Amino acid sequence: MVAYLFKIVGLGLLDALALAACILFGLDANFIFAGSVATGILLLNWLAFSRRSYPFRYLVPGLFFLAAMVVYPIIYTTYIALTNYSTGHILTKQQSIEQFTQREYAPPQLRHFAFTAFLNQHGMLTAVLLRSKEKEFVVFRDGHWEPVEGHELVDEDGDSTVDRLDGWTRMERRDLGAYIGELQTLRVPFEDGWLRMATLTEFRLFLPCYVYDPTQDILVDQQTGNVYRPVKGQFTTGDGEVLDPGWMEYVGFRNFIRLVTTPRYRGPFLRVFLWTVEWALFTVLVSFVLGLALAILLNDPKMRVRKVYRSLVIIPWVLPSFISILVWKGFFNTEFGLFNQLLRSWFGIAVPWLVESFWARFSLILMNVWLTYPYMMVVSLGALQSIPDELHEAARVDGATPWQRFQRITLPLLMISIAPLLVGSFATTFNNFNVVWLLTEGGPVVRIGEPAGATDILISYAYKLAFLGTRGNEMALSSAVAVVIFLVILTISAVSFRYTRVLEKVSRGL
Amino acid sequence: MMKKAFVGLIALTMVTGLFLAVSASEAGKLIIWADDTRTPIFREIGEAYTASTGILVEVVEMSMDDIREQCITAAPVGAGPDMIVGAHDWIGKLVVNGTIVNLELPEDVLAQFDPVTLDAMSFGGKLYGVPYAREGVALVYNKDLVPVPPTTWDELIKIARELTDPTVPQYGFIVEYPFPYNCFGILSALGGYVFGNNPDGSLNLCDIGLDSTGMILGADLIDWLIEEGLMPAEVPWETMTGLLSEGRVGMVITGPWGIPIAEGGGVDVGVAPIPLICGQPPRPFVGVPGVMVSAYSPNMAIVQDFLLNQFITKGTQLAMYQHDPRIPAYMPAYEEVKEDPILRGFAESIANGIPLPNVPEMSAVWSTWSDAMALIGNQQLEPPDALQQAAEKIRETLECK
């Protein structure tokens, strides 16, 4: 009963929140969000109350997070890859036009107006009296204005400031802070432009820099008369002069075509891809072999103080990698690093660790193996302990050598539980941006000006394209790279899982 | 409609944290985004402004990168600040994204600023920020190891030879390398430049000077120093500051940001201009921090008043200097503090400086240029080849043919 009450109250609160969100989104004309929130909450209610939906209660949270964390980012990245989203093209066309039509300039002959604001008896701002040498008029809150004639102005204390206007009282200067928000938003259409508050003491006349003509989709510069037309997401004159900011628009497969046809991008792509595969493969293989060897060693009951060893070898995993990687980076420094200082004093040689392509790749894999082998060891230890001892005993009775036992019994049984983890580990390493970035930032240089260095993996290459691009950020181009990476990993995973399913069949056969 | 939803989504995903922590800009109240070193002083300035006008000022602390990137995405959906405190080399990117607005300040106010700082804050001939300081690198030396700073490169090389002994380890002369920012003084002394100027003073993006004779000659000097073992070629910032604060290095080229680190290690440092090269003064990059105004601010009148009557005053500018000693851009404040020896060292060093180009195209230059300097550093390429290749690549990338 209490649980039921709890459910009703909790759901009620959620419904109320969702309703509020829907209304807010709806007011913002954001119907997609409003719609998805509404559908979501209806679904949730149905799940909570319908008997038939009972089994879904366990599936829906997973499906929800799958949609939110996996499906949505993929769709969104693909969408970005089909646009020109980049520095200078981040606004919508509407926002861009709004920016231009709101740009203003003060005419060379400044026209300024002193202002006095008036409040009604409730303390609400009702009107503003604007005064210049030649003109005097009353502005209302909706922005329209009337000549001062026909309004009653009273100067009570004779200091030549108006104290009352149509019965409203003058706002004291010390109260400006409370009303300034409203005063600033007043935009009074006046002559060819508008009046607005320019300083805390006066309004000024401003003229529009540009006027937009929606019928022809052109922007006209009011000072020069130049006509700008939309070309490639930017307002452009006939002779190619462009206006910033531009806007984001759909460009089809242009980014993918650019990736394939521009030598600057195409050149390194294949090299980076191959290295990414090498890097993931070597890291996983070497660390798995090392981890497994350690696991077998530490699983041997004859080994003394196993627990101490186990705790010691797990250290690389426990240290925050952000710190340990930077320490490694210091070790690898050619001039000041620990490794070269030792090598120099022992053998009189220096290795160009992070300076030369081969050694940089070597260092990176070395360090990543150090970071990953404890994980491999821990999962192997667990899997080893799940292999029944009888099998080993039986094999021993049959006279199998330790190597044969490992090869025929331990490894196949181990692979059943470990193979999916290896695939996962491969995919993680494939995209392990942090390790690469913290140690080498993708360097050393392969060719001057090429966006990818010798140790850049696809994801760091995409990052470099996005944020160290030609002209600021190239989000769309790097999204295209991300989509390609996604397809590659999808293929690799699909193939490997098919292969691990074969292993599972083997285990069922046992 | 679709696009609007997506922009909303971008904003939602990228600034979720901000929505929770920060109130969006609203009419009648100023919101300023500043980094951790400047937040306290801007809070003080804000409080003073509130006391005199009754208008609230909220200062939100963020990291430098967040200030720029979040402002670009948050401002168009109305979740941005009114003003940001940033560096002048952001301006290009912020302007082409439509994030900041150009400022109209009276002539007599502008006349009180160091003209270089106003140049730095301008883009396409318009002013986009109020500078409050100028900074750049100089020769920072450990007074225990180098009692008298060198005034010529011959002297510098002599001192470096005497001090350098990697087995101690002790070094005579260290520059953060290969990132070219710190050694640009050497590269520019004989006429090296990044972008040339158009007749109207704006940058000509197709006049790329990485392979200019002056820059190649400068790079030759660096190459020679590296070959002679007088200047290590792989020096990240952490290494440079580590050696400096441990007192293991005689001379470095760094900016005012390196001083607290050296002094934190108990090292007594002096600041001098980088020595002349063949009689020509090095021209390091000048960076100009300042205040920029969001194009989406609903508070243009308050902003104008805040800048003119609160921020651009001798009192505020001096308070900013007291809080974090950088060379004031506002001349009346500079006149008061110019006797400080460290500040004077930096001021002399950057007196001939070149403003760091503020165009968004710089991001293409930095990476390519670093590549070239790295290959010069590890002796894979000779300076002329490396720099010519870099310049060609940049011309290609920026479509200058």
Image (tube, rainbow, N blue to C red):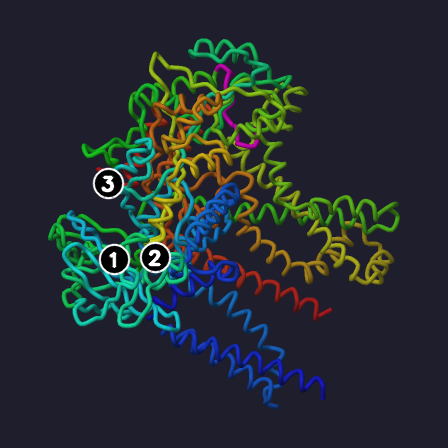
Q: Residue at x 35, y 59 (%)?
A: B298
Residue A346 picture quarter? top right
Q: Position of residue B368 (x, y in %)?
A: 38, 35
Chain designation of label 3: B
Q: How many marks?
A: 3
Q: CA distance from mark 2 to mark 1?
A: 38 Å
Q: Position of residue B208 (x, y in %)?
A: 28, 32
Front tag of 1 and 3: 1
The kind of secondary structure element at disc 3 is loop
Q: Amino acid at mark 2?
A: Tyr
Q: CA distance from mark 2 to mark 3?
A: 21 Å
Return the residue at label 3: B125
Q: Amino acid at mark 1?
A: Ser
Relative to A387, A135 lies left or right: left
Between residues A311 and B304, which one lies in front from this camera angle? B304
Return the residue at label 1: A160
Between residues A302 and B207, which one lies in front from this camera angle? B207
For residue B373, above or below residue A174: above
Can residue A234 be seen here? The reply is: no
Relative to A439, A297 lies left or right: right
Which of the image's four quarters has the C terminus of chain A?
Answer: bottom right
Can residue A384 be seen here? The reply is: yes
Relative to A46, A7 lies left or right: right
For residue B252, above or below residue A95: above
Sooner in the amino-acid sequence: mark 2 or mark 3: 3
Return the residue at label 2: B296
Which residues are drawn in magenta? B228-239
Do the residues at pointers 1 and 3 share their chain? no
Q: Is residue B234 magenta?
A: yes
Q: Residue at x 57, y 61 (%)?
A: A496
The kind of secondary structure element at disc 1 is loop
Do the residues at pointers 2 and 1 share their chain? no
